[in-house]
Image: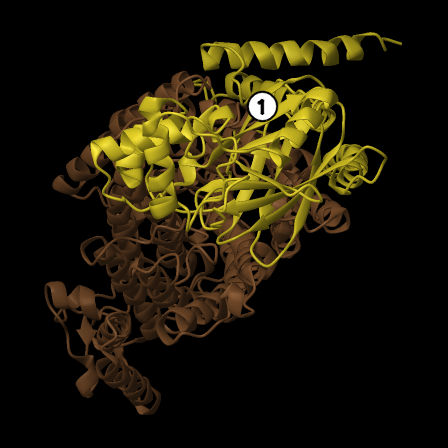
Amino acid sequence: MRRHRRPGFKASLPLIVTLAALLLGGCGLGKQSTLSPAGPVAQAQLGMLYESLAIMSVIFIVVLAVFVYSLIRFRARKTDTELPKQVHGSTALEIVWTIIPIIIIVALSISTVHYAFALETPQTGKGTVQVQVIGHQFWWEFRYPGTGVVTANQVHIPVGKKVNFSLQSADVVHSFWVPRLGGKTDLIPGRTNTLWLEASKPGVYYGQCAQLCGAGHAYMKFTVLAQSPAAYKAWLQHMQHDTVSVTTPEETAGLALFKQDCSTCHTIQGTPFHGNVGPNLTALATRPTIAAGTLPNTAQGLATWLKDPAAAKPGAKMPDLGLSQTQIQSLVAFLQTLK
Amino acid sequence: MAAITERVAIAHSEARSYHGIWAWLATVDHKKIGIMYIYAALFFMAFGGAEALLVRIQLWQPNNHFVSAETFNQLFTMHGVTMIFLVAMPILIGYINAIVPLQIGARDVAFPRMNALSLWLFVLGGIFLYTSWFMGGAPDAGWFNYVPLSGAHFSPGAGVDFYDIGLQITGIGTLMTAINFLVTILNMRAPGMRLLRMPMFTWSALITMLLILFAFPPITVNLILQMMDRLFHATFFNIPLGGNALLWQNLFWIFGHPEVYIMILPAFGIVSEIIPTFSRKPLFGYESMALALSVIAFLSFMVWTHHMFADGLGPIVNSIFAITSMLIAVPTGIKIFNWLATIWGGQIRFTTANLYALSFIPLFVIGGISGVMLAMAPADLQYNDSYFVVAHFHYVLFGGTLMGALAGLYYWFPKIWGRLLNEKLGRLNFWLVFIGFNVTFFPMHILGLEGMPRRISTYAPGYGWTTPNQIATVGAFILLAGMLILLYNLIRTFAKKPDLVQDPWDGRSLEWSIPSPTPEYNFAQLPLVEDRDAYWVAKREGNGELPKAEPVGPIHMPSPSLSPFFLALTVVIAGYAALLHVDWLALVALLAVFWQIGLQLVHEDHGYHVHPDVPAGGAAE
């Protein structure tokens, strides 16, 4: 009959939601918005949002219409002399409003079960990429099995490939969430969870910890850098063969300082430094931020961090090393050579 | 009414009377206990609200440093713990105490002294929790207190100990309330008050008490296990030593989800009383309403892992729990449609009580819509632990529970305190709360979809989160204004002389058939109940007098006693001692607790009798 109306309504829903978001968000869809999916997982989840919101909106509008109509039509009037008709119930009506929700739930269950299996089963196809994620208070460690590559707070993935993230925690429960690529999964100590995501387009996707993990919870951010497969491959190779070369006296002094003060906790590929308490700092200078998205990766940002980590980032586990201004400058110079 | 005013004490030492504050500390009268529950809940609400306002101020702008990250975690943890355990449940238990015995035609609860013990455990347990702020810091691992974050290694301060011990203390009280009211409702109904003649609020109380009875043991087990971990170095939740992080989560949510219904079912009950009264129609679909309550309660124990969809439990578990969770929409929908059918064709009076009760319908439907969305497990992975969830549960717990509680306050105030709250101020109070609530919490749906995780102490600019956060903060202050109007209304009403109006709303159930405030024995003669809405029927078909089930005669009443208060106090002393590792004192206090319980067991309380007035000018007061 009027079948054309429903798709029309459904198609306009994204627009309605977007408009509402624009209206309330002030400056449009944010860089961490579930409403602007950039991969098939987030796309499927957004589709479920539209499906459920569409059906539930119809219910809400019906309820609201009956409600508002009743409030106006059946308000008490001075002219009321007799009691209203005393109705105790209606079996027929009550059956109707029991059956209709059941039908709706059956409808919603179909996509729920379908996507539960589609989205929550680890991917096995050819070209699937494996990345190991380890959550720490309050930063992210990313390992690429079989390559020896370890990085922190920025994970590189190839575009158009399914990526299986295996999720583990070194301390408390964290949650790995990149809204534009898909929903979150918790990192639970003592367990290994998996989550697969895929980025359809190259770009930087923002993520952060979604499960309360302590004082630094708000500062446990990371980025996903989705690259063309070629660029991704090149990066992996660069990370495996990275070497450290210092030239200026300041950088050399920084290297010495690093050996003395930092190497028990931090690893740099191509050096004898293999501490494994803090983040791996190989190619640190190529990362956009430091301290899990807390500070920009600039000389200024690095200096702020080294001066007093806990002041720059609540709950930070890195101790204040009591470095002098000169020492900080040397260390910053050295760290900026890690390309 | 029958003139039973003279009190003749029988020859027993227990029948002593207490005066001033002692009368309150010693009372076992369910009405006074109810009043104290409500006062205490409103008192704690001021603190929980203040914590929420500080959270909202902190989130006003990006990179704000109004409070530290550590303080922020304590603020939202205590806000959640307070509002759930010290406000929502107690205020509803307060109404249940004050009203349910009246609705079923009883003279008190089954175990009046145990009832007083429940109250004091809640009040003193709540104060115990709040002293954490002055003793090294409040709990800070969130109201669901996940391990291992809340374990001794990651939370070395005493905050989580306050949570573990404080919630055990209040929890024992709540469990005893459940036993007390189950027995009261099942055994102490007036003659003729069959189960299917009980007012819907009493039905909701009955089902809620069943929920408490089964839901509180799992959380108690959790709290005890964690207390063992933290105080005595056990390893139930110590992961490197073989502890299990999911054990806590499972036990917590096996309690936690029914807990949500413990907080909402009594609000359903309140709304089911008020809407028929102010529509001048009986509740539509009474039987299906009672059935829906029972089905919701039953299902509530089968949905707990929907709080754990992001735990990686796999597609089978998530599918099953997604479907059971969605099923709850069916009985809930029945309730919503029955309320709509009740107002349909009625003569609706827009009193403040009814405004609150009516607003419950659309607000709870919004909460229900987001609830169904959250139940869709794969989509939930986007909403879980985001502000979308924060929006959802505030729509059900504020838009549902608190709106219901405020409806109940305006509705039963004249019955409980014998005076009417000001309606003009009431309407202003309602509109400010209604608008403030929506302005605060609706933008949080958007924040969640825009990727803002809950419980972050601050955020950077550039995420599109600033404007919705600012709207929410403005809304919180509108809410504050609304609640201050309520406070003013309360103070003003207490300052005036009692109206003593018995039945201001043309009520339907038994509580309106007796004077306001109610005499201590409630019913001079127990009524004989022959209908649902018995008092309404008596008013329409007779002279408003219910048939009596007994002749006028002496009424047996329980004696007041200070022992519940002191028992609760001893429990709290044991709590402090354990927390401060003064082990000998903890041991002595626990022995004293058992000693006092033993005394109660062997002690015979004969109570006292209230005798009818001697008709010919006797010695009436």
Residue at x 42% of width, y 47% of height = A263
Which of the two residues, B45 or B492, is positioned nearer the viewer here? B45
Q: State the hue of chain B.
A: brown
Q: Is residue B5 left or right of residue B368?
A: left
Q: Is residue B20 left or right of residue A14?
A: left
Residue B392 drawn at (x, y percent): 52, 34
Taking the view exactly as shown, the residue that stands out farthest to the right is: A1
Relative to B29, does residue B599 appear above or below in the rendering?
Answer: below
What's the image's color scheme? by chain
Relative to A203, does residue B35 appear above or below in the rendering?
Answer: below
| SS class, disc 1 | strand
Q: Chain of mark 1?
A: A
Which of the two residues, A151 or B381, is positioned nearer the viewer here? A151
Residue B621 drawn at (x, y percent): 12, 65
Neighbour tally class for label 1: few under 14, some 14-19, many 20 plus, Cα within 10 Å? many
Residue B191 visible to an observer of this rendering: no
Looking at the rendered image, the quarter that the N terminus of chain B falls into is bottom left
Relative to A256, does residue B351 appear above or below in the rendering?
Answer: above
Taking the view exactly as shown, the residue that stands out farthest to the left is: B20
Residue A270 drawn at (x, y percent): 54, 39
* Residue marked by disc 1: A205
Residue A174 visible to an observer of this rendering: yes
Residue at x 44% of width, y 16% of height = B462
Residue B384 drawn at (x, y percent): 57, 38
Quarter of the rendering containing residue B120: bottom left
Instruction: Identify by letter the chain in yellow.
Output: A
Q: Is residue B19 left or right of residue A41?
A: left
Relative to B510, does residue A104 appear above or below in the rendering?
Answer: above
Hey, what amino acid is under mark 1? Tyr
Residue at x 28% of width, y 33% of height = A328
